Image: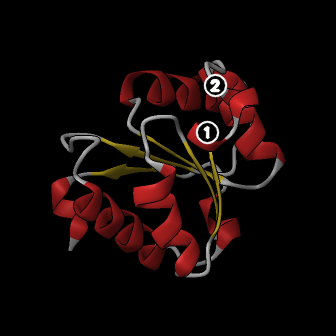
Amino acid sequence: MRLLLDAHLSASAVGTPLRERGHDVRAVDEERALDGAADERLLALATAEERIMVTFDADDFARLTRIWAGGGRHHAGCLIFVGIDHSEFGLTLRVIDSALAARPEQQKWRDHVAWGTRAAAT
């Protein structure tokens, strides 16, 4: 799967294991040019590259995906974490693995928003 990890997802602790699992991962914290980029710019980048946006920024990305849907604008998918701390790397990886296993085809993520919760780690 093709993923874009938002700034609060560690490229080393989350991105590296995902790459080792065979995923194509870009991570905002690895790219100086993306440092401080607006959320809409990141969602547009993820969409242009057909990457699922993975983020802890629930308020902004939930709002953005609703606005885009209301305007007929598509995105490549969004996995939004809630109720999990940024430092819970193992849990974060389990939730990502579970979300990707539940929807294993990249194109099935188009316009889909998934919620990454503790319950979703099973």
| Residue identifier under label 1 | 28
Q: Quadrant of the N terminus?
A: bottom right
Query: Where in the figure is residue 113, as x and y percent of width and height?
Result: 48, 48
Quarter of the image where one finds residue 3: bottom right
Query: Where in the figure is residue 68, as x and y percent of width and height?
Result: 66, 28
Q: Specify whether 4 is left or right of 114.
A: right
Q: Specify whether 107 is left or right of 88.
A: right
Q: Is residue 33 above or below residue 29?
A: above
Q: Specify whether 30 is left or right of 57.
A: right
Q: Residues within 10 Å of mark 1 (few under 14, many from 20)?
A: many
Q: Amino acid at mark 1?
A: Val
Query: Where in the figure is residue 28, as x and y percent of width and height?
Result: 61, 39
Q: Residues within 10 Å of mark 2 (few under 14, many from 20)?
A: few
Q: Is residue 71 above or below residue 83?
A: above
* Residue drawn at the location 63% of the way across and 76% of the way down: 105
| Residue identifier under label 2 | 35
Q: Note whether residue 97 is visible.
A: yes
Q: Earlier in the sequence, mark 1 or mark 2?
A: 1
| Residues under numbered marks 1 and 2 in contact, where contact means CB atoms less than 8 Å apart | yes
Query: Where in the figure is residue 21, as x and y percent of width and height?
Result: 52, 81
Q: Amino acid at mark 2?
A: Asp
Q: Is 122 or 12 nearer to us in this picture?
A: 12
Q: Is 25 or 54 nearer to us in this picture?
A: 25
Q: CA distance from mark 1 to mark 2?
A: 7 Å
Quarter of the image where one finds residue 91: bottom left
The kind of secondary structure element at disc 2 is loop
* Residue drawn at the location 53% of the way across and 39% of the way down: 6
Q: Is residue 56 above or below residue 78?
A: above
Q: Note whether residue 72 is visible.
A: no
Total numbered labels placed on residues in the image: 2
